[in-house]
Image (spheres, rainbow, N blue to C red):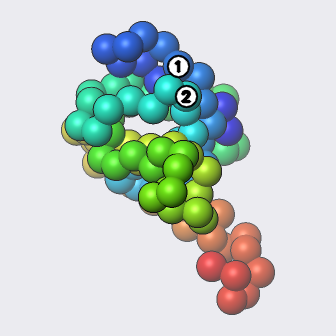
Amino acid sequence: TPCVVSGPRGLARGSVCNLSANGVYITLDPLPALGEAVIVAFRLPGGDDLFERAAVVAWINPDGPGRVRALPPGCGLRFANLSEPDRERLARLIQEFLGQLPRGAA
């Protein structure tokens, strides 16, 4: 899913690779700095509204020898001050997705 990140360095476009109830892993170039406060915006699967929330860069996975190979270069964003209804909404969305996977694939 395409995303837009806004922070001290301006706007950057990227892609959502992984979503949890606590944060999101995105590909982005250039990568923000560890600990940087940002706003991330993307559309949730099956929804038309824009999910735009504050987040903090929790970890970075830059291209290079130390990169976690299972993921493309990018960064993990931890949602900041996410409301309980938002957290529950994300948890439901993830459970629905997992329920659609073939047995044993999750």
Q: Residue furthest top?
A: 10
Q: Characterize the local packing of mark 2: few (<14), some (14-19) or many (20 or more) Cα atoms within 10 angstroms.
A: few
Does the image show residue 31?
A: yes
Q: Secondary structure at mark 1?
A: strand
Q: Is residue 86 left or right of residue 104?
A: left
Give me the residue at 55% from left, 32% from top.
28
Three-letter amino acid code at disc 2? Asp
Q: Give the residue at the far bottom of this rendering.
A: 104
Kind of element beneath mark 2: loop
Residue 75: name its quadrant.
Answer: top left
Task: Give 17 or 19, whichever is nearer the viewer.
Answer: 17
- On the rendered structure, is 12 left or right of 21? right
> Badge 1: few (under 14), some or many (20 or more) residues near its Cα, within 10 Å?
some
Q: Nearer the viewer, residue 85 or 106?
A: 106
**What amino acid is at disc 1?**
Ala
* In this view, the mark in front (2 or 1): 2
Which residue corresponds to the image point at 41% horizontal and 55% vertical from the top-left? Answer: 21
| Quadrant of image for the C terminus | bottom right
Residue 54: x and y, percent? 32, 29
Instruction: From this view, report whether residue 72 is shown above or below residue 81.
Output: below
Q: Which residue is mark 2?
A: 29
Which is nearer the N-term, disc 2 or disc 1?
1
Which numbered dot is residue 12?
1
Q: CA distance from mark 2 to mark 1?
A: 7 Å
Q: Are marks 2 and 1 in contact (CB under 8 Å)?
A: yes
- Tell me: 14 left or right of 9: right
Residue 103 position, x and y percent, is 72, 87
Q: Please report the residue visible at 28 percent of the width from the left and 39 percent of the height from the top.
A: 34
Residue 51 x, y percent position in the rendering: 50, 31
